[in-house]
Amino acid sequence: MKRIFYILLFTFFCFSGYSQTQKSAFSEQPKVVKLYPNPATSFINFEFDKRYSPNYKIVIFSFIGKKAAEVSVTDQKVTVSLTDFYRGIYIYQLIDGQGNIVASGKFQVVK
């Protein structure tokens, strides 16, 4: 009986420490891009932290994977017009000069 208790106690402490480590690792990563308003109607703003580079670009895809827009990042804040966008959920990717994805996320367009 004691053996089972110690095994359960050991298992509990091992897995609880692992999950806490996982949570803290994800919470320490700073956000590179902030977007607003979400949901959006006529435009959406992308704001970048101070580490942004002028050779970044934002690529926006519809939820089914069709490319909707590609915008070069020229400033710390970029506004994208949504006049040609349909209602729905869109995925964005922030891509650096080498083609690596720096950040990604989603936003909703409501009209």
Image (cartoon, rainbow, N blue to C red):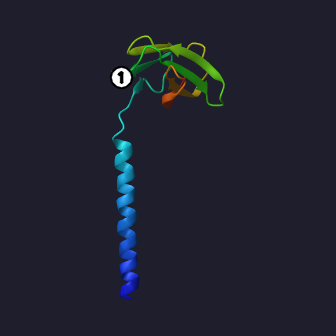
What residue sits right under mark 1 in the picture? 51
Q: Looking at the image, which residue sits at the far front?
A: 98
Which quadrant of the rendered structure holds the N terminus? bottom left
Vertical relation: 13 (above or below) 41: below
Name the residue rendered at 35%, 43% in the picture.
27
Vertical relation: 61 (above or below) 21: above
Vertical relation: 39 (above or below) 12: above
Residue 94 picture location, percent across and down: 49, 24
Q: Amino acid at mark 1?
A: Arg
Residue 77 picture location, percent across and down: 39, 15
Q: Looking at the image, which residue sits at the far bottom?
A: 1
Q: Is residue 68 left or right of residue 101?
A: right
User: Which of the 4 quarters of the picture holds residue 109?
Assistant: top right
Which quadrant of the rendered structure holds the C terminus? top right
Instruction: Give whichever of 59, 83 is nearer the camera.
Output: 59
Name the residue rendered at 51%, 18% in the picture.
57
Name the residue rendered at 35%, 87% in the picture.
2
Q: Is residue 74 left or right of residue 70?
A: left
Residue 36 picture location, percent across and down: 42, 23
Instruction: Give whichever of 85, 55 is nearer the camera.
Output: 55
Badge 1 density bin: few <14, some 14–19, many ≥20, Cα 10 Å = few
User: Which of the 4 quarters of the picture holds residue 82?
Assistant: top right
